[in-house]
Image (tube, rainbow, N blue to C red):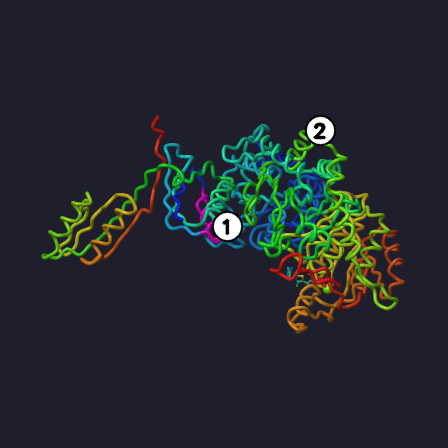
Amino acid sequence: MKVTGAQAMMKCLEEQGVEVIFGFPGGAVIDIYDELMKTDIQHVLVRHEQAAVHAADAYGRVKGDVGVALVTSGPGATNTVTGIASAYMDSIPIVVFTGQVPTALIGNDAFQEVDIVGITRPCTKHNYLVKNVEDLVPTIREAFHIARTGRPGPVLIDLPKDVVAAKIKFPEPKPVKMQSYRPTYEPHPGQIQKACKAMLKAKKPVVYAGGGVIASNSNEELTELAKNLHMPVTMTLMGLGGFPGTDPLSLGMLGMHGTYTANMAVANCDLLIAVGARFDDRVTGKIDAFAPNAKIIHVDIDPTSISKNVGVDIPIVADCKHALAAMNNYLRTSADFDSDDLKEKHTPFLSQIDEWKKKHPLGYIQDDEKIKPQFVVEKLHQLTKGDAIITTEVGQNQMWAAQFYHFNHPRAFMTSGGLGVMGYGFPAAIGAQMAAPDRTVIDVAGDGSIQMNIQELATARQYKCPVKIAILNNSYLGMVRQWQELFYDKRYSGTDIEVAPDFVKLAEAYGAVGLRASKPSEVEPVIKEALATNNTVIMDFVISREEGVYPMVPAGKATTEMLLV
Amino acid sequence: MKHTISVLLQNKPGVLSRVTGLFSGRGFNIQSLSVAETLDEGISSLTLVTAGDDNIIEQITKQLHKLIDVIKVIDVSETDFVEREMVIIRVNAESHTRAEVLRIIDIFRGKVVDVSPKSYAVEITGSVSKVKAVIDILKPIGIQEIVRTGTIAMARAKKS
Ligand SMILES: Cc1ncc(C[n+]2csc(CCOP(=O)(O)OP(=O)(O)O)c2C)c(N)n1
Ligand SMILES: [Mg+2]
């Protein structure tokens, strides 16, 4: 029996285990929408295509699988670009379907035609224009395979309208085999041995864990390794939750807004064990001064990440989970390994770390007058027992969330790390809530960023997503203002956003709930009420306007040159 | 340092722009690039000449390899290899220089491929240094037009 391309696509999506699609329709994808309606796949109608991609991104992160978005040609497709670029920078597996004008019209400047494959080439892991209906199903299978394997990432499939209308016999499922794409999962045993020997020898080792730990689900293997060897662990923004944030061995986040302890520990370590991280400039600061005395082990599934920014002594190309398991295994059977010996050997360094922690902990001073944003995040942590899924916008709000919500579990923190796109957090919260209906999901937001995708209040309401938005409202594009305060003599050019909607009324206009706290004493009651409300809630926290994020390493400086509170 | 990199890739639309986009997007330079089908029409071979220190060349080969459509990447200049370039040069050939041009072409084992009363178009094939030498010698006579294929290269087979 023959089916249309659109019908084949639905069958193939079901075969791939797709349960939810975030999308927005248009002329080029009406045939697909017509079939989508007949399936069990839930469609979530967003109010802007960028939101569909961010929602798919967070949905995939929470589920540990591929998120899916569907949009129309032309403007629908171009609106996805920011979301795709964010997923690319953060190695998030998503598949984005875009409609396209009929093949006969491609290249003719047809109505709503855009070369989206050309536009997204540099910000997708791979992309396709499907020109024949015979290629449709194999392409979709390949796309999901590419998105979810190796270093994950976004894949885009452009679907001309005539291709999804044409008929074919549905090709039987078969495993994807690609001549030119075979990621390396297994580590080289010799490298594992070298790495373990270096770890056994080190006096001052530090583990530097990135998003790869989350992507590969290797938090348990990492925790086992670090605890057995008594090695302190610092995490990148993307790696938070990869090791328990409240564990005594946790140093917290490192880098530009990292903890004093994490940056000092890295600067003084004799062995740095980088796992699924990419030595981003926000992490390293001035490159020559980054871990200057350390031997470096680097585990990553993507060979291009190794020795890209910083020279590596022991490279290990592998899936983090496989590599860490191999290390744990090696150590278990190694005659040289004695956990107590190592503890003793690391004691001077670990005591030094304790001193650093005491000397400059993350801190703030809360008075009776103005709400401090850090206080809000700490209260959120306390009242959710550290168990919520947190998404963030971008700016100061993002850094405060990262610093003060001490993540103990993976896949609980969704943020746009590499691209840093304002407007990510709210649609991401919706995506996360769709993936985990029973969890508390909170978007820690800025007053600027939240306005970039505020229209999604309608989506949240339509799908009864009880997500909570905590606006840390400073009436500024705060992070940019902070740079202007520190490096531009307080010339606040273009960063004052005092003209803003009344967020409480705005929430109400959408049928959501709006709450405001203007005094420190109101913070806890507002959060409690929000958590008890089975509806979308905006909490508007009017915070101390010129609060800054500290520590801060000025761009291009060594990470030890921190500005402290 | 100059490197000659040989790449096997899927012969699909857009593949070449993935390669060139990678170079422009990451600020690598391309000195020349040449691409054509192999015996298997589903696979193309591409030779590109680039320059950079060891770190850059390592990134270039890794990044090329990371492209989904790329099957194989070899830095042939790391091994023993042959490289050739072909050039067609239209050079002034008036009565007093016609014989001289022919003599030069002969020395370089070139061929005249087009003749007009005031010019010859000549074809020369050889290593990059040979092509450069021909151009340097013909320049004073007057080169009207020049077209080059870019370098193609192949690693030499192991001798034993
Ligand atoms: C789409 C986008 N445009 C611009 C920026 C640059 N930028 C980074 S942080 C920031 C300020 C964000 O303001 P707000 O959301 O109020 O957060 P705050 O820093 O005040 O917490 C800006 C403009 C960005 N990251 N993303
Ligand atoms: Mg703000």
Q: Secondary structure at mark 2?
A: helix
Q: Position of residue A406 (x, y in %)?
A: 78, 49
Alpha-carbon span between mark 2 and mark 1 = 50 Å
Could you say which disc has been placed on residue A118 in the image? Answer: 1
**Disc 1 residue: CB within 8 Å of ligand 1:** no
Using the image as rendered, state which of residue B37 and residue A416 is in the foreground: A416
User: Magenta region: which residues?
Assistant: B13-28
Q: Position of residue B147 (x, y in %)?
A: 28, 51
Q: Quadrant of ligand 1?
A: bottom right
Label 1, residues with CA under 10 Å away: few <14, some 14-19, many ≥20 = some
Could you say which disc has been placed on residue A487 in the image? Answer: none
| Residue A176, quarter of the rendered image | top right
Label 2, residues with CA under 10 Å away: few <14, some 14-19, many ≥20 = few
Asked if one can make out residue A100 in the rendered structure from this viewpoint, the answer is: yes
Q: Secondary structure at mark 1?
A: helix
- The verdict on residue B26 being magenta is yes
Q: Name the residue rendered at 42%, 36% in the picture.
A: B43
Looking at the image, residue A185 lies above or below residue A78: above
Q: Main secondary structure of the magenta part?
A: helix
Query: Mark 1 is on which residue type?
Result: Gly
Asked if one can make out residue A443 in the rendered structure from this viewpoint, the answer is: no
- The verdict on residue A422 being magenta is no
Using the image as rendered, state which of residue A40 and residue A421 is in the foreground: A421
| Residue B111, quarter of the rendered image | top left
Q: Position of residue A458 (x, y in %)?
A: 74, 55
Say whether mark 1 and mark 2 are on the same chain. yes
In the picture, measured across the screen, residue A129 lies left or right of residue A375, that is left
Q: Which residue is mark 2?
A: A332
In the picture, measured across the screen, residue A352 lies left or right of residue A11, that is right
Query: Mark 2 is on which residue type?
Result: Arg
